Image (cartoon, helix red, strand yellow):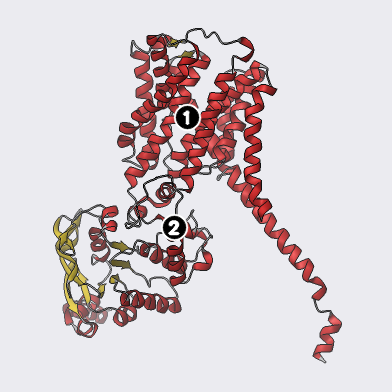
Amino acid sequence: MSSLLRTDAVSKAFGGVQALSGATIDIERGAIAGLIGPNGSGKTTLFNVITGYARADSGQVFLDGKAITNARPERVFGLGIGRTFQLTRIFPSMTVLENMLIAGQHKERSRNPLARAGGAGARRHAMDLLDFVGIASHTSALAQTLSYGQRKLLELAYVLVADPEILLLDEPAGGVNPSLINIIADKIRELNAARKTFLIVEHNMDFVMGLCDPIMVLDYGMVIASGPPEVVRNDPKVLDAYLGTGDEDDDLEDGRAGT
Amino acid sequence: MSASRLTRPVAIGALLAFAVAFPLVFTNPAVTTNAIYTLIFVAWAAAWNSFSGYSGYISLGHAVFFGSGAYFTAIATIDWRLPGSDVFWLLPLAGLLGGVIAVPFGIFALRVRRHTFVVITIAVFFIFQLTAYNLAVTGGTSGLLAPTINFAAATYNNPFYYIALGIAVGTVLISWLIRRSRFGLQLRAIRDDEDRARGLGVRAMRVKLSAFVFSAVPVGMVGGLWWYFTTLVDPSSGFDPLNDVAVALMAFLGGLGTVSGPVLGALIIEPSYLYFQQQVAAGYFIWMLYGALFLLVILVLPRGIIPTTAERIGNWLDRKRRNGAVARREPQVVTAADRDKELA
């Protein structure tokens, strides 16, 4: 298998905070890769750098071997990287179907800028995807009337419209009810079977461990471990990152003992 | 279903027929004069809305295009000594000039968003007004006077009326085409969440700039027409900041971002402004009323007349349908006696 998305020693600081310090990840084509790490470890920042929402101070991003470092968001999307946001972002004052028709379909380019949006083909494609995620019955509702979980599904669906090669999902299971989490996981597996590659940031460990392979662990802006779930789960560095180092534990216990 | 589908074309057709017949029915020049000013603002508000209403970038600088169109038409007419109705051929050029000015203006102003954008459009506006005050070619404070036109007195207003109507209808038509196009969809996506839209491949700068440039063209055209009709442009009337506020108010009152809202707003506000100015009290009192009306709209009808009314009617129809369904079902409702029997 070949590498589809790769970052090479990406660093990014916000003022005095080093959000990323030499983050290197490598995602093979066809993988469902997981990216985990404690709060503030740089997961979303890495997403932002890859998708052009933040500029890298140093380091490189490659898609299919081609450098795309610091490309603008609209270009990154055009190259085949779709993403969703941690706090779901839909277009509230537009209908669900209109939301679906925004994304540029890079295959069809209309010459007449005033041609009606969404020809028969585009509409059918949009309806198929809404059907796929299970919100086809809300087509003509305003997106702001959707529940949080439905918004997540809509965001996934409209990113899929342009048929991206790889999807970056920022906490797809965050804030949604358990039955919907399973649905989302199933959808990801189905899409993966249809040759879509995924990179998923998620805090829900059951979700990540059950779905992703490999898993990369980010801490203080660096990848401290990566590999299959069972390896990562037992890696002492990972346990330290999540639970604090052994020294800190001692401090903690001393502190408790003192009170 | 077919009846309701026919309602809209029939209503639009009736409105157009009325507009075309208007100067033939109401031949009083005082009335047609007010109608021409109203149509000028219909075109301006519709054009403004096709950028500001759809994209959410509120421009208070479109008077730049209006004044530039007016001055361009004035200077060209005087320099080239154009007679009578030949001047009307300048209007497409006046519109083109508005579009050309909008390119650097837009590239400069559209880098920033929201309040900063509004402030920059105001700043650019004042640069143009000050320039008009100080250039020799614009006639400074005294402005530029149109030559006398030898139209027949009885039908003097008609050419102006029909050209204003043509520009207004064309602008509304294009505004409607934009709204249902992919381009319009992307503009509205920018209004909702510009960064998210970029992440879906929307080339935000290009889309915004195109809309900005398009919206400048009809405004430049009606600026030229306005000069020839009023016969005088000076810096304070050509570049009038109150026109920008009035146009924004028209769009907000009717329904920002809808096709018909700004048209309705212009049809309400401009005639009532003219009536007030001519019949009640001239001067600045009307502007205080505007301010109060703006506050009222924002507080009571924040989405404007068209969306609010459409929603009310929709809800009313829903309720009627539901009540109708209940009424029809009523005979089937089981009576207490039936239930007793069932239980027994």
- Residue type (three-letter) at the residue carrying disc 1: Asp
Quarter of the image with the N terminus of chain B in it: bottom right
Is B17 left, or right, of B216 in this rendering?
right
* Residue for badge 2: A99
On whether disc 1 and disc 2 are found on a single subunit, the reply is no
Q: Residue at x 24, y 78 (%)?
A: A243
How far apart are labels 1 and 2 at the CA level?
32 Å
In this picture, is A121 found above or below A114? Answer: below
Within-10-Å neighbours for mark 2: few <14, some 14–19, many 20+ = many
Q: Nearer the viewer, residue B81 or A50?
A: B81
Q: Nearer the viewer, residue B293 or B50?
A: B50
Whether residue B293 is visible here, answered yes or no, is yes
Instruction: State the image quarter where residue B262 is shown.
Output: top right
Judged from this view, the residue extending furthest toward the right is B337
In this picture, is A146 found above or below B209? Answer: below
Write down the chain letter for disc 1: B
Give coordinates of residue A49: x percent, y percent.
Answer: 23, 58
Give coordinates of residue B287: x percent, y percent.
Answer: 56, 26
Q: Nearer the viewer, residue A136 or B327?
A: A136
Kindly identify which numbered label has been placed on residue A65. Answer: none
Q: Residue at x 40, y 62 (%)?
A: A158
In this picture, is B112 found above or below A75? Answer: above
Is B142 left, or right, of B39 in this rendering?
left
Give coordinates of residue B101: x percent, y percent.
Answer: 34, 28
Kindly identify which numbered label has been placed on residue B244. Answer: 1
Q: Secondary structure at mark 2?
A: helix
Give coordinates of residue A151: x percent, y percent.
Answer: 44, 65
Instruction: State the image quarter where residue B214 is shown.
Output: top left
Instruction: State the image quarter where residue B82 is shown.
Output: top left
Within-10-Å neighbours for mark 1: few <14, some 14–19, many 20+ = many
Q: Disc 1 or disc 2, which is closer to the eye? A: 2
